Image (tube, rainbow, N blue to C red):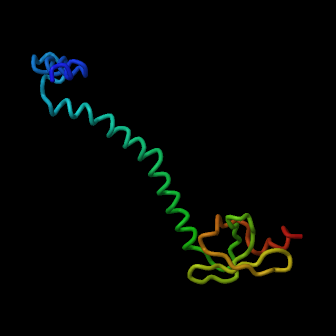
């Protein structure tokens, strides 16, 4: 068993903490704390750099989909632009093109609401 400890270097680490010569003062709670602090810091950084912004973006998309109304000019995830004419629970009916062709989409398939007003549609399409 002593050979295994020597190979892994455990004996020197254990002897150092038994003599009180290591930096933690021989307190195992402090050594565990020094071991866990980097993991906690990594998690905190990951939360603020990845998880939190993703949750904010999901909330914005959810709010945008909940606030859709008739007359909004939208863009679908397929790149089709149109104007909403009817809303149901999970479907959106919109008209596209110069002939106002009706199309039905799932609500989740809407990428964005455009800032162009409905009154300006005729000017931009012609």
Of residues 123 and 41, the one drawn nearer to the viewer in this rendering: 41
Relative to 50, does residue 56 appear above or below in the rendering? below
Residue sitting at the far right = 126
On the image, the x and y values in percent for residue 100 come to: 81, 80
Q: Quadrant of residue 36?
A: top left
On the image, the x and y values in percent for residue 115 come to: 69, 65
| Count of number-bearing discs | 0
> Quick check: 58 left or right of 117?
left
> Quick check: 51 left or right of 115?
left
> Quick check: 80 left or right of 126?
left
Relative to 55, does residue 97 appear above or below in the rendering? below
Relative to 61, does residue 34 appear above or below in the rendering? above
> Quick check: 16 left or right of 60?
left
On the image, the x and y values in percent for residue 61 come to: 55, 64
> Residue at coordinates 10% horizontally, 20% vertically from top-left?
18
Q: Quadrant of residue 89?
A: bottom right
Residue sitting at the far left = 19
Q: Quadrant of residue 42?
A: top left
> Residue at coordinates 63% horizontally, 69% vertically from top-left?
109
Quadrant of the drawing holding the N terminus: top left
On the image, the x and y values in percent for residue 55 come to: 47, 57
Of residues 100 and 18, the one drawn nearer to the viewer in this rendering: 18
> Residue at coordinates 76% horizontally, 81% vertically from top-left?
102
> Residue at coordinates 15% horizontally, 17% vertically from top-left?
16
Quadrant of the drawing holding the C terminus: bottom right
């Amino acid at each position: 068993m002593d050979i295994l400890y020597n190979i892994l270097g455990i004996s020197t680490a254990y002897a150092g903490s038994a003599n009180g010569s290591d930096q933690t003062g021989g307190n195992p709670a402090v050594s565990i704390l020094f071991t866990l602090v980097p993991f906690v810091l990594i998690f905190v950084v990951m939360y603020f750099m990845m998880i939190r912004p993703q949750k904010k973006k999901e909330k914005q998309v959810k709010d945008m989909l909940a606030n859709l109304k008739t007359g909004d000019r939208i863009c679908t995830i397929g790149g089709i632009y149109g104007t909403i004419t009817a809303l149901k629970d999970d479907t959106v009916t919109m008209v596209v093109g110069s002939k106002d062709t009706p199309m039905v989409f799932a609500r989740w398939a809407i990428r964005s609401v455009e800032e162009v007003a409905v009154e300006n549609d005729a000017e931009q399409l012609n």
